[in-house]
Image: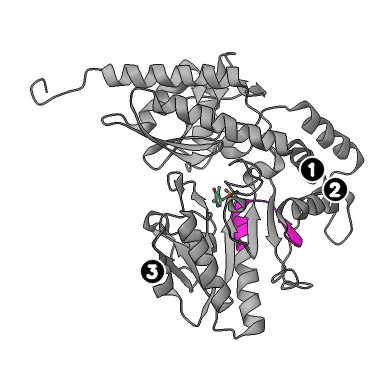
């Protein structure tokens, strides 16, 4: 099959929900992948923060294959060993008390929303169901998580949405305070708004939110679907701040490439969900859990420190590049604001032509490389980016005189 054949079939048989790049990916090893024509690409995307150990990590493959040979799936009506092993490590890494496993970030956030509502319904009244989320947030694509997403663009065409989601301005504590009512059961946020353009929340804001939550017994839900599992240089990004989430959601990087989502419950919420309150057919699949255990075992203190160092190294190099206006983010979650008249989507297209895969987030470029990317690979990728930015800046553009 050629690239043109794949494109034709995709065009005919796949729903048109993705604006795909001009690239097919056939195979990958480490931080490099190749297309059908065997061209190589440095990967600064990790499949949107998923392949945290890169492509085809040997130890991860071994863990997954070994489990696949033993037991590929069993219902959650029964006990399985990889699931409890993963839950134990997750609790040890985060100080949380219990875990519910699902299959994606949106599903994890659905579980968090259900839990927050039940907590307040059990303890106060069924009227206490409001959840405050932030403008410019992103929490998923299901109907409830779209409602939680504080961006109007996502709400077009899909209403009506479930009641009870209230939006407050990010990094505006007085706006959050003003939106709190006696019916507020939770505040839900990302410490760094990923899809929103790698926009960090300030520590004053986050710690102020914690105070509001403490005073009113409002639950703090932190969506770490993108920021979690070491991405920012701590296991959870929330661990950088003086806050104590009651619920944390994870997905993306957790499975190292296979689909898994997790809802972590703190002391307050660990017994909120009881028999029959929630469930998932595939959630906590033993093969995926065995791979996730390998991901977490790789993420030791040394690797986390290394993520911080590599992030700083990349940010410093970016800031010396022509065409880079500013850099945001932490660890290996970086947003790049490019100078006018550069356009991030065009930069991504040009980078692919030269052998570099990166992402956009809103008007920015976004880097989410594998957490174990090597310095030589970083240098190779940044060289391509610098070249593309520079060439694009020098490209003749139509002006009033020559149109
Ligand atoms: C990607 C993302 C989600 C949605 O995850 P899916 O696995 O695509 O459902 C939710 N929240 C945040 C912060 C994300 O980055």
For the N terminus, the image quarter is: top right
The image's colouring method is: one colour
C-beta proximity under 8 Å, tags 2 and 1: yes
Q: Write the residue at 39% across / 37% down.
A: 364
Q: What residue sits 59% from the left and 13% below the top? A: 38
* Residue 357 % position (x, y): 51, 26
* Closer-to-camera residue (243/184): 243
The residue lying at 37 percent from left, 58 percent from top is 152
Q: Considering only order in the chain, which callout, 3 or 1, is on the residue closer to the N terminus? A: 3
* First in sequence: mark 2 vs mark 1: 2
Q: Which residues are magenta?
A: 96-111
The residue that mark 2 highlights is: 82
* Nearest the eye: 179 or 127: 179
- Give the distance between the C-alpha atoms of the residues marked 1 and 3, in whole angstroms: 41 Å
Percent across and percent down for residue 181 are 46, 80
Labels 1 & 3 near each other (Cβ < 8 A): no
Label 1: which secondary element? helix
Residue 303 at x, y percent in the picture = 69, 34
Distance from disc 2 to disc 1, alpha carbons, whole Å, reads 8 Å
Query: In the image, is residue 99 part of the stretch drawn in magenta?
Result: yes
Circle 3 SS class: helix
Residue 118 covered by magenta stretch: no
The image shows residue 307, relative to residue 179, as above or below, that is above
Q: Give the image location of residue 273, x and y in percent.
A: 73, 71
What residue does disc 1 label? 293
Q: Residues within 10 Å of mark 1 (few under 14, many from 20)?
A: many
Give the CA distance from mark 2 to mark 3.
Answer: 45 Å
The residue furthest right is: 70
């Amino acid at each position: 099959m050629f690239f043109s054949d794949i494109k034709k079939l995709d065009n005919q048989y796949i729903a048109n929900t993705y604006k795909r790049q001009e690239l097919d990916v056939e195979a990958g090893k480490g931080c490099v992948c190749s297309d059908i024509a065997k061209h190589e690409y440095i990967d600064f995307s990790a499949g949107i923060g998923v392949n945290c150990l890169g492509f085809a990590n040997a130890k991860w493959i071994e863990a997954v294959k070994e489990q696949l040979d033993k037991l590929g799936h069993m219902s959650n009506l029964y006990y399985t060993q990889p699931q409890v092993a993963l839950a134990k490590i997750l609790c040890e890494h985060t100080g949380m008390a219990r875990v519910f496993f699902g299959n994606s970030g949106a599903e994890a956030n659905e579980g968090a929303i259900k839990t927050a509502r039940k907590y307040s319904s059990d303890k106060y009244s069924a009227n206490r169901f409001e959840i405050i989320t932030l403008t410019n947030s992103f929490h998923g694509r299901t109907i409830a998580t779209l409602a939680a997403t504080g961006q109007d663009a996502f709400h077009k065409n899909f209403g009506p949405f479930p009641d009870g989601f209230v939006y407050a301005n990010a990094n505006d504590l007085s706006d959050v305070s003003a939106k709190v009512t006696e019916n507020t059961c939770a505040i839900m946020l990302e410490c760094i708004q990923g899809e929103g353009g790698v926009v960090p929340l300030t520590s004053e804001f986050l710690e102020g939110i914690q105070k509001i939550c403490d005073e009113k017994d409002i639950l703090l839900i932190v969506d770490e679907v993108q920021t979690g599992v070491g991405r920012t240089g701590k296991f959870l990004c929330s661990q950088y701040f003086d806050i104590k989430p009651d619920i944390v959601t994870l997905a993306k990087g957790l499975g190292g490439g296979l689909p898994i989502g997790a809802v972590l419950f703190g002391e307050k919420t660990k017994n909120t969900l009881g028999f029959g309150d929630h469930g998932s057919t595939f959630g906590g699949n033993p093969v995926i859990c065995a791979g996730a255990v390998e991901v977490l075992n790789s993420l030791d203190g040394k690797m986390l420190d290394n993520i911080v160092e590599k992030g700083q190294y990349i940010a410093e190099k970016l800031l010396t590049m022509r065409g880079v206006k500013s850099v945001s983010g932490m660890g290996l979650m970086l947003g790049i604001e490019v100078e006018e008249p550069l356009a991030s989507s065009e930069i991504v297209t040009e980078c692919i032509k030269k052998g570099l895969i990166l992402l956009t987030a809103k008007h920015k470029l976004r880097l989410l490389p594998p957490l174990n990317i090597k310095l030589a690979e970083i240098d190779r990728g940044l060289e391509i980016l610098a070249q593309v930015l520079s060439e694009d800046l020098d490209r003749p553009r139509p002006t009033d005189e020559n149109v």
